[in-house]
Image (cartoon, rainbow, N blue to C red):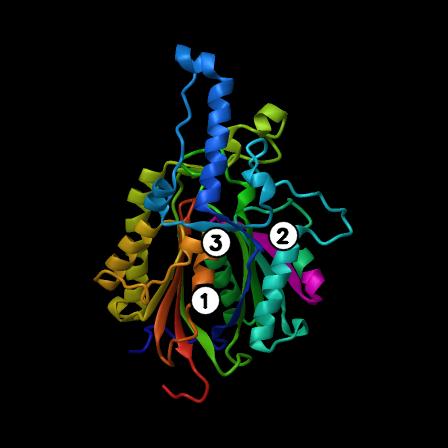
Amino acid sequence: MTDNFKQPAHRPVISATGLYTPPHSISNEELVDSFNRYAALHNEHHAADIASGARQKLEESSVSFIEKASGIKARHVVEKASVLDPATMEPRLAERPDDELSIMAEIGVAAARDALNRAGRAAADVDAVLCAASNMQRPYPAMAIEIQAALGIDGFAFDMNVACSSATFGIQTAADYIRSGNARSVLVVSPEITSGHLNWRDRDSHFIFGDVATAVLVESSKLAPDAHWEITGTRLKTIFSNNIRNNFGFLNRTSPDTAGAPDKLFVQQGRKVFKEVVPIVADLVLEEADRLGVDPAGLRRLWLHQANAGMNRLIAQRVLGHEASEDESPTVLDTYGNTSSAGSIIAFHLHSNDLRHGDRGLICSFGAGYSVGTVFVRKVAAGATS
């Protein structure tokens, strides 16, 4: 079946992807031990208030609770010791001088170089860098420009943030630059240090996030290596919701008490998010598949946002029309945790090489906003014909 839209003069493709995985991993067992030690200290310190009813007693976490709620078994982090220390329970990274590469740029560069190497491409061939991530290390200079400079790319760069959909929104933006002829090669880099925005003291969410960096090289088909992925269609959607929120920012960091308030970190109403996001995502995917003339049941693989195993299972079922197998909808959530916008890209990076010429798939992410990004792709293999 052919896609039902006019082919642009410059067709965008994914030439390669790159991945950087931090060296440290935290298992659920380690995480539970840390949280429960914190809860015990908290309850002991506030025993009088707890006894009087002025303060609630903190419940312990458990491995079974975490795995049932999320499907997560471990997560990678850029800094481990301080996260597991009940006295700190947050990453403590030494601030680097301005003339030294920042940590967010450092891991972004590592992922970008991996993508360039896989495509056989030099940095000089790239026209633009988009840093698409849920949390930026600083307001300016843009992280993307620092990554651009570290790679030695002559062109332009900018940051963009659409929370967990940042990477797919970045892919459409890059594809639009290709289609319009304003760029031939664009790197979409997603360094996600999500351990910094997670409240490790919150039993309902302390297990969710992990750190990673991904890169996607989007190019004109005229430059692409023999084996690549044709971007056949993209669709974005946003709907305002407070059900996932982070209020941290330069306007409200006025005191230590304000800076440490729970709403200055990741907060969500998980049940509402689950109930509302699943149909939004599934409906958008089905609408775009219909517009493209693609049979959703014929999609060979879905690379979905790695936020919650239950959400992915329901979305895949609605799209494919049946319960998806691990082969049809692979997960990396169990070992990486929720890595925000990078999750669907990790799944694509690790679970796409086995597909054959002509196979179709979907990269899809969703999250705070609400935001949903869909990227339909078709495998083009070396020496094969349609």
Amino acid type for the residue under numbered disc 3:
Ser
> Is residue 19 placed above or below 10 in the rendered structure?
above
Q: Amino acid at mark 1?
A: Leu
Asked whether residue 158 is in view, the answer is: yes
Which amino acid type is shown beneath numbered disc 2?
A: Met
Q: Earlier in the sequence, mark 3 or mark 2?
A: 2
From the top left corner, tell me how far across and down residue 293 is, in percent: 28, 71
Tell me the quadrant of the picture where the N terminus can be found: bottom left
Q: For this rendering, which residue is in front, 373 or 134?
A: 134
Q: Which mark is residue 350?
A: 1
- The residue to which callout 3 is attached is 341
Q: Which residues are magenta?
A: 148-164
Residue 162 is one of the magenta-drawn residues: yes
Choose between 116 and 174: the one closer to the eye.
116
Q: CA distance from mark 2 to mark 1?
A: 22 Å
Q: Disc 2 designates what residue?
A: 104
Q: Secondary structure at mark 2?
A: helix
Give the alpha-carbon distance from disc 3 to disc 2, as whole Å. 14 Å
Contact? badges 1 and 3 (CB < 8 Å)? no
262 to 239, vertically: above or below: above
